[in-house]
Every structure is written in C-alpha cells, then in structure tokens.
C-alpha cells in the first residue's frame, strides 16, 4: 500500500547480523502532525528519551528505526549514537534534525556503534520509495516470524484518506514483554489534539489489552504521523462525523496489529480471548482478565489443550476482582465447564477439550456479580517459548 | 527423626493413582497447641475453610492429608468429604472431631469421593508409628521429585526440644504457585501467642520469599503443632532466651524447607538468590526483587546460562522500586556486570557466564539510592517446566 506524500526504505546495515534488513526509514515530504505513546518503564532507551523530547513540538517528518540493538542502558554513548544517526538522516534529507524520530529494538545493554549508520544512511535515503513500507516492516522484526502491517481507506466528506500501520513484537505472551514498535502513517488532515486522543484511546483498547499495564520494555513506542496530503476537510471538533470515521479506522488498525502480535507470540500455537464478565467494577474485571491471561499455569494448560479450569479459578482468586466463589461460571467458547463454582463433569470437559484444540477460542469467566466486562487477548505458553528465550542472544 | 508424643503413617488409598502413598496422618497423643497460616486466595479449598474455622480454638491433635485431589471448587459435597473424613479419623482415634485438621493437594475441581477414605482410614490409624513421618512426606508429593523434611534439636533451659518439619510444593517458580503444604511438629512447651507469632514471622521470612505475596493456590497452608511432651520451661515472654532459641530454630526449619521447594521447582536446574540492595525503602526493594525473580524472560535467560542483564534492568524498571537508571550496578555472585547503568563489556560477560553455569548463585542489583535490602529465592524457567505443566492432569 502507498500513502500520499510518504516514502520508505530498508537496508542491510549489519548492526547485529549480516545480510538481513535491519535499518528502516519512513519519510514524509512535509512535516507531519505526530503523536506518540512511549514505554512507562522507568528505564527508557536512548531513542525513547530523544523522541519524547522532540515530540513536544507535535510534529515529525522522518522515523529511523533499527533492529539488532535496543540502544538501551548504553549511557552517554548510546544517546550520542541516537542523536548522531538522526542528524545524518536529517542532513541527507535536508530537513531539521528535530523532525527525526528514532526507534530501536533488539538486545538491551550492548553499545551501539554509529559506524553501521554512517555507512548505510546514504543508501537508505537513496532507496526511499512509495513502495518501501513492506521492507521496513521486515527490517524491524526480531523474534517475530512474520511482518505485520494493516491498512484502511476511509472517506472523509467525500475525500479518500489512507492509513497504513506497521508493527513488530512477539514476546508479550508473558507479563514481561519484548519491545513493541508501531508506526502508523496517514495522509489525513487532522489536528494534533485529535490525533493525540486517537493514539491514546486506541492504544488503551488494543496494545494495552494484550499485556498487563506497566509491563513494558525499555523501547516500546507507538507513533502516528498525519501529513495532510489527502486534503480532506480537517478532522477536528467541528467535524464530528469525520472524527468518528477516522477514530474507528485507526482503532481497527491498532487492534488488527495487536492481534497479529499475539498470534505471533513467541512459540504460540493458539490465540485466546480471555473475557471476564459480570464484575462489580471495570477495574476488577480488567484485573481478573489480566491475571488469568498472564498465568503461566493457565497458559501451559492451553498449550496442553487441557480444560484445567482449576488453574483459571485459582488465578481469578488472586486477582483484584471481587467475586463470590459459589457464583462463578466458566465457558470455553459456548461450552459451559463450571456452574456456580463447581465443575460440570467429564462430559463437559470432553466438549471443552474439543474447543481447546482450536487455534482460536474465547474463555469466558462470568462472576455474576454485576455488569462490567473486560477482554484481554493472549496466547499459550509453549516449549518453544522457553527455547526461544533461553537462546535469544546466542 | 522422632518427636515425643507424635506418631504418623501413610497408606495407598488410591485417591487418584493406584499404588502410591497418597494419604497421611499425623497424630499427637495429647491435644497440641496449634497455629497456622492459610492461603490468601479468595477461592479456598474445603479443607482450608474447615481448618480455619477449627483452628480458632488454638489446638489440634491430628492432621489428615491427601494428595491426588485438592478438594477445591467442589461445593457442598467437597465440604462434606472434608468433614466426614475428619470424623472417621476422630472416631478411629477416639478424639474430638474438632481437633482434626485436614489438608489436600492435587487437581482442583474434581469431586472427591469419601470412599477411598472410608477404606483406608482404619489401616492408616493402625499404622501410626513414631517413625512414620518420612512416609507422610512422600504421601504429600505431587510434582515434587523428592520428599522434603527438616529437623532441629535445641536446648531450652537444659531440656532437649525437638522440631520436625515436612513440606511439599514445587510449582512456585512462576508468579502462580502449585499448592504448598508444610507441617511442623515439636514437643516444645510453648504458649499459643508465641507459637502464632513464630509461624507468622517465620512464613514471612521463608515461604513468602519464594513467591509473590498473594500468589497463592487454593490449598496452601503451614501448620505448627506443639504438644509440650519435652516438658521444658514454658516458652513465653518470661523466657526471652527460650523464645529466641525456639524462634531461630523454627525459622531455620522454615527457610530450609523453602529452599528445598525452590530447588525442586518444576523443571528447575538452578537456584538463584535475587538480592536488591541500596533501595530507598524496603517495599521498593521487595517489589524489585519479586519482579526480577518472577520475570519469565529473566528466568529463561538463567536457564540459557545467559548473563542477559538487559532483561534484569527492564524488569527492575517496571517494579515499584524508585531508582535512577544511571546509578544501577548488577553483579552475578561477586562478578560485576553493570556499573552505573552501563554494561561492562565482553570480558565481564564471559566471567558472569561462568557464574551462570553454577547450580546456585546470587544475582545482586544495587540501585545505590539508600540502605534497604531484600532477598528472594527463585529458580530458572526450563523447557521441562512447560512440559510438566502442559501434561499435569494427563
């Protein structure tokens, strides 16, 4: 997919491995309205610190992103590499250095040399093309097994507007995630405050549903750039219909990318929607959904295709959700396994086992104490997860 | 080891599997002073509910414990089985039913029939012997690979006092633990309030250091019985030296059993002490130690013998511990890997890798911001952990 006024490229810079795309560039011909959400981890990688500072202006024109090295915990030298690499891109593009965002993903704590950037940036800028986004989606992969993109076309007051999102991330199947990066480009004309609200709300309803709040890496970021090239009526509070269409399309892209990340969870064989309903308050429902979705014992049972509802109820019991054990019902898709806190026996278990053999299913826990609902998306915990993470750096 | 006035036995009751010890009994000739700590999970198994109610009297004379079925989420029938089995034991022993504590460990949510108890209890009571404790330690094993016992002899004002502890538990290597049971018998003469304090403080400094507070199963319990058969001077506030000796010995037993549990963690190949020092406050230090010790990414790196300090610092960063990233130092045993937030390079990493090959080592994270220290004991996350937990019920 192409987005008017945007181009992209990726090259093999040899940052960690030879002969794989590991450096990408996204460029807007004009300064774009830009809004982002960054990791809440107390330890922030050098590029994250630089981006937060620069994004105060609400604009960006280019994103330089590398895999292979997270440039985190790298001290003054890491910050110098982040700044220097952004300056090289700015000089080559003839734009203001402050308009360049930088992003990194990979191993934490290894010094990141500027040399691969010096060598690769001229080729990278030369290679910019309206068709370059797929290459960037590949260049940002680490333990991801597939590149992740999502796009939508919408009409705002009769004008066609395009949106394209790229993401990476595949380690968030535990309460401890690998870096998640997401870049969304649109040619929409949209004011900053609207774009910022769309990003914050969208992230809350997508990426934050696939991990526990606060379980962030040092490098996570979601960045959206809108360059206005579509020339649509401005999306702002005077255009509520436009806002609504734009917000819906952006949320769809966020959710699509989030689900792609879960499905590509390290070693994952299944995607499971954990739904907690009937809670007294929303916080309780969310706490219960997150606690169940992140329980290693629940996730290994998913991997084993075992309708082990005892582990589910034990995880529920240590969450912050108020409930009465004697009122809990549990369903795998629409097959009921537990009624009023008691298992429904072997026949129900056999029916549930059939659901558990599926690639995707919904686990519903109904605490029958109120009206609040929360959904979290997760995957199973497999033998391969451990193998991947025991060997990641080797 | 024998403890005056106590006897024990275990039999093959066929509760879940044939031909393995799965039902144990501990008996004191006289009513013993008894104190316990039980799971904080909102879902409590039937025996736990019964025990809490009965332990209000501060006394117990027998413990009936089974493996193979947790008798949790089993409704009224589960409670009836717990009560009826305790009544059978009481009748057979000729003691008050209220003096019998019951404990169960195994699968949650399967109905627990009274029939194996009816058949086995006469044989169990007949088999009571001063030498029966090792059999009980075996009977309470589930995924444990070894029975766990610990004993001490102390002198209180010239009188010999013996203490013997039995424990089981091997799934607590994640922030989600399998049931932990611990029974400690002593012939000490000790008043109830002292015994209760010893249990509460001892558990806090031992079993609660090998998991996150609140990450409990439906069946966890620690029960201590003191029958006074040694005839020592009463251990109470008028005997501070006796208190001190008794408290130290009890804590040693708790800590010894806790470390045995970690070392037998499901699939564990290493025991790691995670020490966070230099924190501004104790809560922060404890939060950091628990977050690091429970990080799946950190634990898989331990398994991979990879000095992946980036994952350690990322886990630290999402804990509730205040720190300045530029002041953090990290050590594996006494080899420094990180100084002031920055890695010390390949040579240090090679030296750390040698430490990581050991069966036991200490990871020290010094945030250099204060005087508080916290230690948590954990183990690595191996391929076998997933295999064990994916297959547990089959």
Image (cartoon, coloured by chain):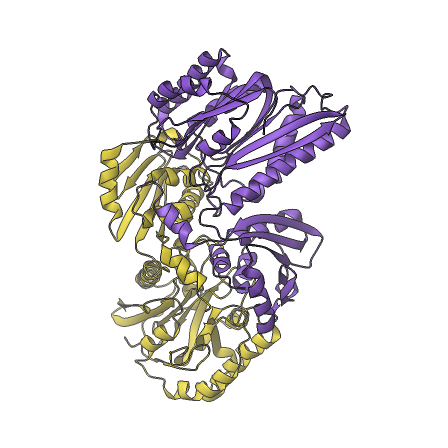
Chain colours: A yellow, B purple
- Residue at 53% of width from left, 26% of height from top? B131
Q: Locate the C terminus of chain A and report the quarter of the image it occupies.
A: bottom left
Residue B143 percent location from the top left of the image:
42, 41
Horizontal side, residue A153 vs residue B188: left or right: left
Question: Where, by quadrant of the figure, is residue A324 drawn?
Answer: top left
Foreground of the two, A349 or A379: A349
Foreground of the two, B3 or A300: B3
- Residue at 62% of width from left, 50% of height from top? B284
Horizontal side, residue A192 vs residue A240: left or right: right
Where B242 sits versus B251, above or below?
Answer: above
Foreground of the two, B191 or A170: B191
Residue A281 at least partly seen: no
Residue B249 percent location from the top left of the image:
67, 34
Foreground of the two, A330 or A371: A330
Residue B183 percent location from the top left of the image:
54, 30
Q: Locate the N terminus of chain A and report the quarter of the image it occupies.
A: bottom left
Where B390 sits versus A68, above or below?
Answer: above
Horizontal side, residue B160 vs residue A379: left or right: right
Residue B21 at least partly seen: yes
How many dots with numbers? Answer: 0
Question: Where, by quadrant of the figure, is residue A245 drawn?
Answer: bottom left
Residue B74 percent location from the top left of the image:
36, 28
Question: Where, by quadrant of the figure, is residue A228 drawn?
Answer: bottom left
């Amino acid at each position: 997919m192409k987005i008017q006024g945007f181009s992209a490229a990726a090259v093999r810079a040899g940052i960690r491995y030879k002969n794989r795309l590991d450096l990408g560039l996204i460029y807007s011909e004009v300064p774009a309205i830009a809004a982002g959400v960054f990791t809440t981890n107390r330890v922030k990688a050098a590029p994250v610190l630089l981006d937060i500072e620069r994004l105060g202006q609400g604009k960006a024109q280019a994103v330089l992103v590398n895999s292979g090295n997270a440039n985190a915990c790298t001290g003054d030298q890491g910050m110098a590499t982040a700044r220097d690499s952004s300056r090289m891109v700015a000089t080559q593009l003839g734009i203001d250095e402050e308009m360049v965002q930088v992003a990194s993903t990979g191993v934490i704590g290894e010094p990141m040399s500027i040399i691969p950037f010096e060598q690769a940036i001229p080729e990278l800028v030369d290679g910019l093309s309206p068709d370059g986004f797929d290459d960037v989606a590949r260049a940002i992969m680490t333990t991801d097994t597939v590149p992740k993109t999502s796009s939508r076309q919408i009409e705002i007051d009769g004008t066609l507007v395009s949106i394209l999102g790229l993401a990476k991330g595949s380690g968030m199947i535990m309460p401890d995630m690998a870096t998640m990066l997401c870049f969304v480009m649109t040619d929409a004309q949209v004011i900053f405050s609207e774009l910022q609200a769309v990003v914050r709300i969208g992230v809350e309803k997508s990426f934050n549903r696939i991990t526990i709040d606060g379980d962030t890496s040092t490098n996570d970021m979601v960045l959206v750039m809108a360059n206005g090239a579509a020339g649509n009526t401005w999306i702002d509070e005077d255009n509520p219909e436009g806002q609504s269409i734009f917000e819906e399309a952006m949320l769809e892209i966020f959710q699509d990318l989030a689900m792609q990340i879960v499905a590509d969870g390290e070693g994952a064989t299944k995607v499971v929607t954990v739904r907690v309903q009937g809670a007294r308050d929303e916080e309780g429902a969310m706490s219960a959904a997150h606690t169940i979705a992140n329980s290693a014992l629940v996730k290994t049972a998913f991997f084993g295709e075992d309708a082990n509802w005892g582990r589910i109820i034990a995880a529920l019991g240590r969450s912050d959700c108020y409930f009465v054990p004697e009122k809990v019902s549990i369903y795998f898709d629409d097959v009921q396994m537990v009624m009023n806190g008691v298992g429904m026996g072997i026949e129900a278990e056999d029916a549930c086992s059939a659901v558990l053999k599926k690639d995707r299913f919904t686990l519903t826990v109904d605490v029958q104490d109120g009206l609040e609902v929360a959904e979290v998306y997760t995957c199973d915990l497999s033998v391969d997860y451990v193998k991947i993470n025991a060997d990641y750096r080797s």
